[in-house]
Image: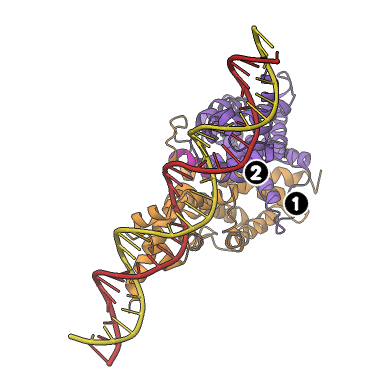
Chain colours: A purple, B orange, C yellow, D red
Amino acid sequence: MATTKSDAKKEKLLAAAGDVFMEKGFRDATVAEICARAGANVSAVNYHFGSKEALYQESWRHSFQQSLQAYPVDGGIGETAPAEERLRGQLTALIQRIADENNKDFFIAQMELAKPSGLLQEVMRTELIPMRQQTLALVRELLGPEASEQQVHYCEISIISMCVHPMVMQRIAKRTRDKGMPAMIDDINGFADHVVKFALAGIDAIRSEGSKA
Amino acid sequence: MATTKSDAKKEKLLAAAGDVFMEKGFRDATVAEICARAGANVSAVNYHFGSKEALYQESWRHSFQQSLQAYPVDGGIGETAPAEERLRGQLTALIQRIADENNKDFFIAQMELAKPSGLLQEVMRTELIPMRQQTLALVRELLGPEASEQQVHYCEISIISMCVHPMVMQRIAKRTRDKGMPAMIDDINGFADHVVKFALAGIDAIRSEGSKA
DNA sequence: TTGACTTTCAAATGAGCATTTGAAATATTA
DNA sequence: TAATATTTCAAATGCTCATTTGAAAGTCAA
């Protein structure tokens, strides 16, 4: 069975590719560098994956699976817990997931959003949208049956933004070793608490303004 | 005076460059395309600006000046207005600024953050940081003198994120003609109102928890 | 108009890179 | 072990650009 050794090499290529794509983006990553880091010959990529593009897609999927496994969407909070706790679970998991420097998928996705190569569009849609549905449902529950769809929608956007944007910026700042930004968010759990508190207060305010003020 | 005609051409190049850099990013934008759109010869870029890199920096600065002129940071709310109103002014201006499809600077900045070329780092720092100081000061005022620096900091991050992230995503969705996303935020002012309400509620909640609960 | 500029142009030049190739090395199977 | 299939390799190959070049047009001042 040749697969065992061959698979090990593919694994190494996937890992190296994830790193390089995260650092440089699809266009600026070179096959040569990926192969060098994986200790392989330049032609390994084409041999094992067919093309740089195919490797890109594979490597993102690979990273995504890993990161979801490490941080389940619900944050380990069961469905029977009160809604506030479930929100805390989801947001904390999301924040931790982005903060974890081993996770490449979120970062690659960010670049992909900023300048789509088109290569991940399909993969991302099928993977990411179901995740947001869960938060949407939870927000709807917290807002109560009176709330309009638009209110639910706006709240969900606000809440996700409070998690995603700061954490992505944080990682960027770290990467660029920006001395102007002195470790903005040092305590991940503290920040997650802040976001949950802020979010719940916001939801309450919108809720009490009635269905479209 | 040759400058008059020469300046007109430079202006055209700057505009075309802004468009192309916004659509493709620095790396994928080609000098050939920029010149074609500006109705100029390929060597025009090097003749007028020295290099593609220099054009990139110039064109960002140019876009930034334009967009700040169109949307002053304070949103036209004077310093004597109550803090809540000044916050509304700042956030509304920021949201409108990003939403305006004539503004390229924010979008280019987004790509630059996701994958820094290093070319804008200095320009952006000097331009963007002073802007955030204003929001920071306002949030500090709203939180009251009891609030810790960390609370001020976290709140400012949350609020800016609620403005920036959704609007950037919105423009991305529009650009990619994403049929999955049906015009998420149709009413800019309505969304701005939502954000202000949400933000003020969050600030209140943090304020009433005391200086670090 | 003439002579000194500035600006435009089409055609090189040359660098960077993904991908191909065909031979060599290595593993698998019988 | 010999025949066959898989995997690696160094060296092409060929493409896409940014930038250069030197000549041709334009422009201006006298």
Q: Quadrant of residue A156?
A: top right
Residue A23 location (% of width, % of height) = 64, 45
Residue A56 location, quadrant: top right
For the residues labelled 2 and 1, the Cα–Cα distance comes to 13 Å
The local crowd at label 2, few if under 14, some if 14 to 19, many if 20 or more residues have their Cα within 10 Å, is some
Q: Is residue C12 above or below residue A154?
A: below
Both labels 2 and 1 in a single chain: yes
Q: Quadrant of the N terminus of chain B?
A: bottom left
Front in this rendered view, residue A164 or B18: B18
Q: Earlier in the sequence, mark 2 or mark 1?
A: 2
Above or below residue A41? Residue B55 is below
The residue lying at 68 percent from left, 29 percent from top is A9
Residue A168's tag is: 2
User: Badge 1 is on which residue?
Assistant: A183
Q: Amino acid at mark 1?
A: Ala
Residue B32 in the image, given as x and y percentages of width and height: 39, 54
Q: Chain of mark 1?
A: A
x and y, in percent, of residue C26 in the image? 70, 26
Residue A93 within the magenta-colored segment of the rendering: no
Regarding residue A81, the answer to whether it shows in the image is yes
